[in-house]
Image: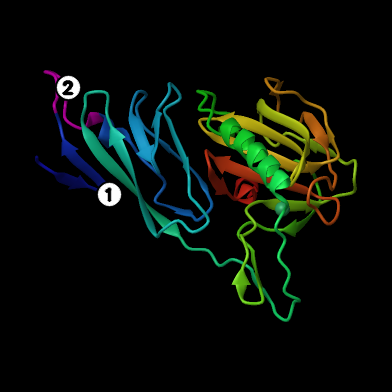
Amino acid sequence: MRATIRAGLLVLACACPAGVHAGDCLAEASLPPTAQQGALVMGSAAPGTVYEYLGHTSVVGDDGVIVFGLARDAPERVELALRCADGTRGALALDVARREYQIERIEGLPEKTVNPPPEIAERIAREQAEVSKARTRDDARSDFRMRFAWPVRARVSGVYGSQRVLNGTPKDPHLGLDLAAPEGTPVHAPAAGVVTLAQTDYYLTGGTVILDHGHGVSSAFIHLSAVSVRPGQLLAQGDVLGAVGKTGRATGPHLHWGLNWFETRLDPELLLK
Ligand SMILES: [Zn+2]
């Protein structure tokens, strides 16, 4: 196998039919030079190019867009595996900028564990499986390319990546954006998409809507007091999908907006900047 390196691009092999130049599709493929942890990353490549990241294999559509997401703690350099239509394989590398997340240490809390009874644990698992299933969809739509808008114009009360450490025990990081608005405030689609899940009464997340923006990119809106859409419905940017609430496990009325690339949780706030 012959390997050549061109500006972050590694060409590994070519089994080229006559007339096809080795790595033409690789030479066309590009990513931004750097992206932050938690970011939705967009690059470009020739239609038909296959790319793989974190075990997800996707095919570049006619729009020529590569899209994937970086986790909260993504390593400082990640690589996409590429395969051209002519069989040439290569890789694209991306430097990942580290972020400092808010860490809140709380000591001296009375020790108590919240272990839901078995029937509740079962219900939670069932609901989480439904959410996971809604996020496996890989549509050719690329609604995520439009500029995202705020679903609710409100004060940010919780940011992506923040983490509480209670009595020395780190809790799960907060992987979304909290917007504090009064109960009943309309929630608008931040970008176009198709509704893939609409539930009014999940145990942890209460009123829950998932909006699919294409190619595995989806938004989740939780703790809603009202859900006004149904699965399969196409929404334009700005359409109302429900109302702010405090359903499920929430201490006060707010919208929790989550952004995913398949199961990887991203920071929606980065799309608003
Ligand atoms: Zn939240």
Which residue is most to the front? 118
Residue 122 versus residue 267: which sits nearer the camera? 122
- Say whether residue 233 is left or right of residue 225: left
Residue 149, given in percent of the width and then of the height, sits at: 70, 40
User: At 83% across and 45% down in the image, what residue appears?
Assistant: 247
Residue 106, given in percent of the width and then of the height, sits at: 70, 76
Residue 23 versus residue 103: which sits nearer the camera? 103
Residue 22, given in percent of the width and then of the height, sits at: 16, 30
Identify the mark at residue 263; answer none if there is no mark. Answer: none
On screen, 166 above or below 247?
A: below
Q: Locate the N terminus by quadrant.
A: top left
Q: Secondary structure at mark 1?
A: loop
User: At 65% across and 57% down in the image, what residue appears?
Assistant: 174
Q: Identity of the amino acid at label 2?
A: Val
Residue 23 lies within the magenta run: yes
User: At 63% across and 50% down in the image, what residue appears?
Assistant: 273
Q: Identity of the amino acid at label 1?
A: Gly
- The 10 Å Cα crowd at callout 1, few under 14, some 14 to 19, many 20 or more, is some
Magenta residues (range):
15-24
Q: Secondary structure at mark 2?
A: loop
**Residue 56 picture quarter:** top left
Judging by the rendered image, the residue that carries numbered circle 1 is: 8
Ligand 1 within 8 Å of the CB at mark 1 = no
Judging by the rendered image, the residue that carries numbered circle 2 is: 20
Residue 30, given in percent of the width and then of the height, sits at: 36, 40
